[in-house]
Image (spheres, rainbow, N blue to C red):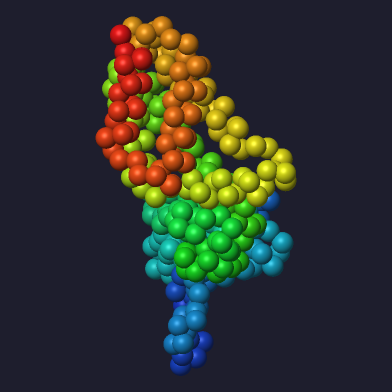
Amino acid sequence: MDFAMLYDKAIAVARPRTLSDSATSGGVGASLFTKSGHVYTGVCIDAACSVGFCAEHAAAATMITAGENIVKKMIAVRSTGEIIPPCGRCREFVSQLSVENKQTKVMVSANEVIDLEALLPFDWRKMILEEARILFIHKGFQAVTMSDIVEACNISRGGLYRYFKNTTDIFISVLQTAHESSDLSLKQAMKEERPALDILDQFFVEQKNDFKEQSLTIAIYEFFFQHKDHLKDNMLQEQFNNAEAILSAFIQYGINRGEFNCVDPRTMARHIILLLEGVRVSSEVVSVNENMLDEQFDLIKVLLSK
C-alpha cells in the first residue's frame, strides 16, 4: 500500500470533535500499515488533565488489540490536511513494539519519508551500556545490581529488562562494545592506507588515553573468576585471539609497506597484547605513569621500525 492511500485513510478519520468541556478529539488522524498488510487508524484525544494521547498511539492500540505489532509504514495528518511527523513519545513507543519497527517508513512531510530509526533521539541500549560501564568501573562486577542500573539510567525496570536479562548479560555486552570499537579503529586506518608508523603512534595514544581513565580491569577479572566454570565460551580468550589477529594483520601491513622489520607478526602481536594487559593489571596496585608507558611503547617501535 502506498502513502497516498494511507493519507486518505488518515484524513478520513481526522474529524475534530468536542467530547466535553474538558476534552476534544480528531485534530489529527493516523494510519499504520502492518507487515501482514492490514491498516489501522486512530485519532488524537486531548484532555484538560493532560492524559490524552496521539493519533499514532490510538492506531497502535487498535493494532495491538488485533494481535499485530510490526509496522511497515506510518503517517499522521492534521484535519486541515497537513502531514506532520510523529512526536518523540510516539517514535519511542512504536519503536519499542518490535525491533523491526526501527525500519518503519514514516512520512514526515508531503515530500519526505524517513526510517523511524533516524527519527529516534538516541539509542536506549547504548545509554544503558555506558551507564552500566561506569558502575562496573566504580563498584566492580559483583556489587552492581539491576536496581543500580535502573537508577543510574532513570528508566523503568521493564525498560531495562527489555534489553538485558541480568547484570551478566549487560557486562558481556559492555566488553563486546569496547572490543569492537578498538578493532574498528585499526581496520579503518589500514583501509585508508595510512603510514604504518602513524597508525602505530595513534594506537599508542589511544592506549595511553585508556590508561588515564578508570578501567574495567578489576571488574573483568572478578567476573571471569566467578563465571569460569559456567560460561559457554571464554570471551577473554576469544578477545585475545581477535586482538592477535588484527594486530598481526597490522604488523604484516607495515612489513609489506617496507616500514617495519621482518619480524614474526603473530609473536610481536602477542608481545604487545601481553604487555598492555600486564600494565593494566599492574596499574591497579602500583603507580604506572605516562613516562613508563612511553618507554615501553618506544621499545616496541625500536623492535618494529626499520
Q: Quadrant of the C terminus?
A: top left
Q: Residue at x 65, y 57 (%)?
A: 165
Q: Name the spot of residue 78 as percent of width and height, x first.
A: 42, 67
Inspect this view and state whether residue 105 appears. no
Quadrant housing residue 263: top left
Point 33% across, 26% down: residue? 297
Task: State whether residue 282 is above or below residue 97.
Answer: above
Q: Which residue is painted at 43% across and 47% down in the image? A: 285
Residue reaching furthest bottom? 21
Give the side of residue 114 with respect to residue 42, left or right: left
Q: Is residue 160 above or below residue 116?
A: below
Compare residues 277 and 43 and report the one nearer the observer. 277
Taking the image as shown, residue 289 lies to the left or right of residue 20, namely left
Give the tally of numbered discs. 0
Residue at point 47% right, 65% down?
A: 152
Is 56 or 286 nearer to us in this picture?
A: 286
Residue 298 position, x and y percent, is 30, 23
Figure check: 275 above or below 30:
above
Return the x and y of residue 302 as percentages of the image width and height.
Answer: 31, 16
One can see residue 165 in this view: yes
Q: Where is residue 104 shown, x and y percent of the image?
A: 53, 50
The residue sitting at the front extreme is 286
